[in-house]
Amino acid sequence: MQISIIVPLYSEAESLPHLAEWIDRVMQEHHFSYEVVMVDDGSKDNSWEIIEELHSKNPAYRGIKFRRNYGKSAALNVGFAAAQGDVVITMDADLQDSPDEVPELYRMIVEEHYDLVSGWKKKRYDSKIAKNIPSKFFNWTTRKMSGIKLHDFNCGLKAYRRDVVKSIEVYGEMHRYIPVIAKWAGFSKIGEKVVQHRKREFGVTKFGMNRFINGYLDLMSIMFMSKFGKQPMHFFGAIGSLSLLFGMVALLVVVILRIVGRIALTNSVWFYMSMLFVLMGLILFLAGFLGELICRNSTTRNQYLIETEL
């Protein structure tokens, strides 16, 4: 199979028939063998009934339904596991991503041998204050911290080699940083394509302003994991050792000054500061040691309750 299209969705019943018709037209025009995996992330409307209807008309449409809302990262992770195509395309269900972009994205993966191609919505129709300006700042920060030269990390329209989606793990709200996760996993040929951004035709956006706060917290998390995820002692242990060394030296100086009668221990702020650094060093060193023991050993991080699967 040439292409797997993964569509994570939450309450997008009005958009789904139009999206399916559009995808079918593009796939047939270019004679692609394909499948469409629609992951219903606990929708509150009749999205699942629409998916069942699409499946009954065309077996290329597959469906996965969560019992409750887990978020976009969960939907993508399950979709990646289910995908069978040589090239995997992700797009949102709200019709703001154009299926007409799929053939060129496919060509870039197959002919130019990219591991991942991310869409860049250069011209956007979102609110400038609520989305555009914060998005530009977010992307600039991610570029600087990750070293990946992309303009739009969070674009839902992306293309991947099959090996990429089978090798990475997406959890929490890490879907914003899939290019970073892919680079961390060793897939370094990451490209970009300017894609069309369309105005939303149905419904309202499901993402609030808190996504920017969560986005930066997730960025800090993933940058830490990429550098110290396997060896947290290298981070906590190094800082803890420096703090402990500074505290011990300061404590030695304070004790010497007390012996020569220059200060009184209980009245000296330096005595308490040295003890604080010693305690901080011990705590950080212990945190690094415990992190080494439990790091990335959670068995339930990516377990989701699937109600039905087509």
Image: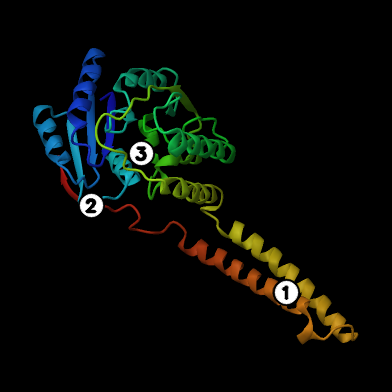
| 231 to the left or right of 132 | right
In terms of image quadrants, where is residue 250? bottom right
Q: Give the crowd class for mark 3: few <14, some 14-19, many >=20 residues within 10 Å.
A: few
Which residue type carries mark 1? Met
The numbered dot on residue 166 is 3
In terms of image quadrants, where is residue 12? top left
How far apart in space, not on screen, are marks 2 and 1 (Cα)?
Answer: 50 Å
When the figure is inspected, residue 47 is found, relative to residue 268, above or below; the finding is above
How far apart in space, not on screen, are marks 1 and 3 (Cα)?
Answer: 51 Å
Q: Residue at x 86, y 81 (%)?
A: 256
Residue 192, image x, y percentages: 47, 25
> Looking at the image, do the residues carrying marks 2 and 3 touch, with CB atoms under 8 Å apart?
no
When the figure is inspected, residue 48 is found, relative to residue 293, above or below; the finding is above
Which residue type carries mark 2? Arg
The numbered dot on residue 170 is none
Which residue type carries mark 3? Lys
Q: Residue at x 41, y 46 (%)?
A: 209
Q: Dot 2: what SS?
A: loop
Residue 110, image x, y percentages: 38, 20
Q: Give the crowd class for mark 1: few <14, some 14-19, many >=20 residues within 10 Å.
A: some
Q: Dot 3: what SS?
A: helix
The one nearer the camera, 57 or 187, is: 57
Q: Residue at x 26, y 14 (%)?
A: 30
Q: Residue furthest top?
A: 29
When the figure is inspected, residue 284 is found, relative to residue 41, above or below; the finding is below
Q: Which residue is mark 2?
A: 68
Residue 142, image x, y percentages: 53, 39
Q: Residue at x 38, y 50 (%)?
A: 172
Q: Which residue is mark 1?
A: 273
